[in-house]
Image (cartoon, rainbow, N blue to C red):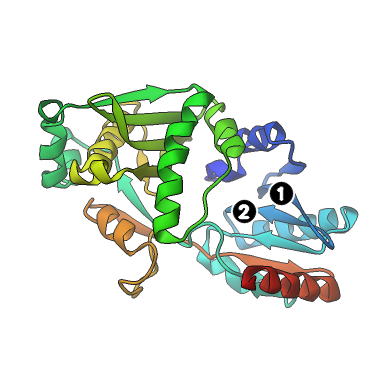
């Protein structure tokens, strides 16, 4: 089974470091990492990009096991994100489509092949910027020091205000960077940080999860230069895929929050991968409906 990083033992350790309660199951035909998420009316089990199974029978067995666990934990519902879109047809009657938490679509670049084949997948314009980076005073450093996460967070906060999106807490990002699979990249211009990116390496895939740049970084094409570096380093490590982590759905308009990100990612000659999306399996309907009602009120205010 191909296990994404968010369903791995390494992600389980991250949850423990965050003081989260989680359960890991690994059977011959399925595996999953279920994270207990407290809510005002109890709790629910969340499986980011899980459960994992190669067959329909394995997926059904995973759901049975999950429901048993959820009832033991007195969970209100189970939130799952199957990676196989066909598995959405196997969901029980008490499952409903929810707002997608992790991206339902992503863009993946193949890192394998000859140097000529590989470089043909990279935008020539960004390669030029990358080759000329030192002439413009741009340097790129890596860090595993959790205290350096403040540089990424500062850039993300500015982006969040501009795009009206949320960011993770400093504690969460610091804990991520403390994991063996994480690397923080910092792009500097004359000593000032103009872009930053946080990547995770797991099972032959580099995940490009967090990134942001300053206004000066935009004029310098810092994100493009950084992305080339992330990809080159991943290939140097003999990784096979570079996952850009999320694109806008097909047909999304220019006003979609990810429109700009998506256009940028698709300048790389990758392929789109579609997942099933996020679904809630409701175990306690009355509490679930009240939970959703309270969430709508909170968002309104």
Residue 186: x and y in percent read 35, 30
In percent of the image, x 39 and y 69: which residue is there? 249
Query: Residue visible at 57% across and 37% down?
Result: 170
Dot 1 falls on a residue whose secondary structure is: strand
Instruction: Report whether 129 appears left or right of 192.
Output: left
The answer to which of 288 and 88 lies nearer the viewer is 288
Residue 246 is at least partly visible in this image: no
Q: Which residue is mark 2?
A: 50
Q: Residue at x 61, y 35 (%)?
A: 171
Q: Position of residue 148 (x, y in %)?
A: 47, 26
The residue labelled by disc 1 is 34
The answer to which quarter of the image holds residue 197 is top left
Residue 225 makes an appearance in the image: yes
Contact flag, marks 1 and 2 (Cβ < 8 Å): yes
Quadrant position of the N terminus in the picture: top right
Mark 2 Cα within 10 Å, few/some/many (few <14, many 20+)?
Answer: many
User: Vertically, is 106 above or below 241?
Assistant: below
């Amino acid at each position: 089974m191909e296990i994404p990083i968010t369903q791995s033992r390494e992600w389980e350790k991250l949850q423990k470091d965050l003081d989260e309660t989680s359960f890991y199951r690994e059977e011959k035909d399925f595996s999953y990492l279920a994270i207990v998420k407290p809510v005002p009316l109890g709790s629910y089990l969340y499986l980011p990009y899980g459960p994992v199974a190669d067959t329909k029978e394995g997926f059904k067995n995973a759901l049975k096991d999950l429901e048993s666990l959820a009832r033991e934990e007195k969970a209100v519902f189970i939130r799952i994100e199957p990676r196989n879109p066909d598995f959405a047809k196997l969901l029980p009657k008490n499952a409903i489509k929810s707002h997608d938490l992790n991206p339902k679509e992503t863009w993946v670049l193949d890192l394998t092949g000859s140097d000529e084949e590989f470089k043909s997948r990279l935008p020539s314009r960004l390669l030029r910027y990358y080759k000329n980076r030192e002439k413009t005073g741009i340097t790129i450093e890596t860090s595993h020091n959790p205290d350096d996460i403040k540089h990424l967070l500062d850039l993300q906060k500015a982006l969040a205000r501009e795009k009206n999106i949320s960011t993770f807490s400093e504690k969460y990002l610091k804990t991520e960077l403390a994991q063996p699979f994480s690397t923080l990249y910092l792009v500097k211009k004359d000593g000032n940080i103009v872009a930053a990116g946080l990547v995770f390496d797991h099972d032959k895939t580099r995940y490009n999860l967090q990134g942001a740049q300053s206004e000066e970084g935009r004029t310098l094409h810092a994100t493009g230069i950084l992305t080339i570096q992330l990809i080159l380093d991943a290939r140097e490590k003999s990784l096979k895929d570079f996952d850009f982590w999320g694109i806008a759905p097909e047909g999304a308009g220019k006003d979609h929050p990810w429109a700009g990100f998506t256009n940028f990612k698709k300048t790389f000659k990758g392929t789109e991968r579609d997942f099933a999306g996020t679904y809630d399996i409701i175990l306690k309907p009355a509490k679930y409906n009240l939970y959703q009602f309270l969430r709508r009120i909170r968002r309104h205010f």
